[in-house]
Amino acid sequence: MNSYSKTLLRFSAIFAFIGAFLGSHMAGAGSYAFKSVHAHILVVGWLTLFAWAVYYKLFPPTNKLLARIHVVTAIIGAIGLTTGMWFYYLNPFGFSQTFTTVFFIVGGSTLLLSFAVFVLLTFTKVDE
């Protein structure tokens, strides 16, 4: 298994556990305060990172720099978006609205950059 695939797979597993834990917590508490965070952790963190892990397993990239940028921005963006969403919607630490908004936007923008780099990767030559 190549390192890009392994790294993304491991992070997707962590996101899967956190998402399942949040779902269990919401069910036990009878509160859906985390519903948006929970959904994004599972969709962006678990499913998307897992799909990208499979992609890298099936199509080892020839452009290593582009692949590295993609993997790094994918992980930072998934963490940044979901953490920023948590800060923005629930504000557990009492951060200022400006800080939570900027954190959320930067995380989401980093993830969007990752998706754009992935599009470029799919149009570059891959080893088959």
Image (cartoon, rainbow, N blue to C red):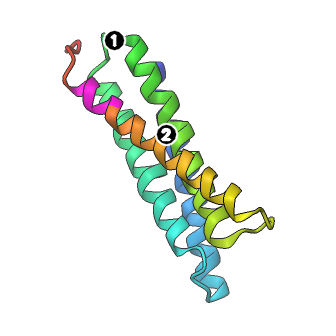
Pointer 1: what residue?
63
Q: Looking at the image, is mark 1 or mark 2 earlier in the sequence? A: 1
Q: Nearer the viewer, residue 78 or 113?
A: 113
Q: Nearer the viewer, residue 105 or 5?
A: 105
**Amino acid under label 2?**
Thr
The image quarter in which residue 61 lies: top left
Q: Nearer the viewer, residue 104 or 82?
A: 104
Q: Is residue 5 visible?
A: no
Mark carried by residue 110? 2
**Amino acid under label 1?**
Asn
Does the magenta run of residues contain 45?
no
Where residue 22 appears, as percent x and y from the top left, is 61, 68
In this rendering, the count of numbered labels is 2
Where residue 54 appears, as percent x and y from the top left, is 33, 34
Q: Which residues are magenta?
A: 117-122
Q: Is residue 76 above or below residue 125?
A: below
Where residue 97 appears, as percent x and y from the top left, is 69, 64
* Crowding near the residue tagged with mark 2, few <14, some 14–19, many ≥20 C-alpha atoms within 10 Å: many
Question: Could you tell whether 2 is left or right of 122 in the image?
Answer: right
